[in-house]
Amino acid sequence: ENIDRLTFKLAEREAFNGIAVLPGVVEVENFDRGGEGLSFHDSDAQDEGGAKYRADNGGVDIVTCTGGYALGYTANGEWTEYTVNVTAAGEYEYVATVSSGSDNSGFSLGLVKDDQVTDLTGKISVPNGGNWDTYTTVTGKLKMALEEGEQVIRLTINSPYCNIDKFEIKNTVGIEEIQNNEAVELATYNLTGQKVGKSTKGILIRNGQKIYR
């Protein structure tokens, strides 16, 4: 089994099905290619999910769910990683679609940089819904701002037996949504204090407040 797992290990990681753009949704079955210990870690080489979504999952258990696939049969300490591109630096929140038939299951999200993982969420508790087929959403705010650009997010199972379908990283509630056809155009600046024009998108500063355009 160990030899088989190493056979699928690539020399370096690459995104599966394209780099996820944030703000946006990350489908958790689309973890990076690379192999055991590089882009994911699973407690064993057996695929208990049986969804046959991808051939390079190396024991990561992928199950079917309404409308697609999810991580299932999760065990404590397992993790998967995702290359993402953050289009604008700033503060964000998460919305995760999850299920569990057990008490106390949960996971966390972290930012991987220079082989170190910085916690973004703390433990995200997954409520016991009585089964693993009924999905719900859990929400919260990221503990730190994200930088603009390409980076890697790690999903780690903190307590076993939760299914995870996807997580969305979205702009923090309270940032004003600005339409392009606004009647009054005030001076607008980026997060470094430089004045910008109407064509600039992302999180900006106008009249002393953060906006998202």
Image (tube, rainbow, N blue to C red):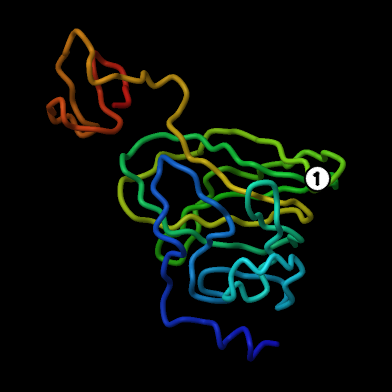
- Which image quarter: residue 73? bottom right
Query: Residue extending furthest bottom?
Result: 3
The residue under the point 62% across, 83% down is 5
Q: Position of residue 182 (x, y in %)?
A: 23, 13
Above or below residue 60? Residue 71 is above
- Residue type at the position of mark 1: Asn
The residue pinned by badge 1 equals 104
Image height check: is 157 above or below 148? below
Query: Helix, strand or loop at disc 1?
Result: loop
Name the spot of residue 133 as percent of width and height, x first.
78, 46
Q: Give the camera-side residue of 13 and 159.
A: 13
- Neighbours of disc 1 within 10 Å: few (<14), some (14-19), many (20+): some
Q: How many marks?
A: 1
Corner quadrant of residue 121: top right
Where residue 29 appears, as percent x and y from the top left, is 59, 59
Query: Left of 23 or right of it: where is 89?
Result: left
Q: Residue at x 53, y 62 (%)?
A: 31
Q: Image quadrant for the C terminus?
A: top left
Q: Is residue 161 shown left or right of residue 31?
A: right
x, y percent for residue 202: 29, 33
Residue 72 higher or lower than 138, as above or below: below
* Residue drawn at x 68%, y 74% as measured from the top left: 59
Residue 120 or residue 79, whichever sits in front:
79
Taking the spot 43% from the left edge, 59% from the top edge, the residue there is: 83
Q: Quadrant of the N terminus?
A: bottom right
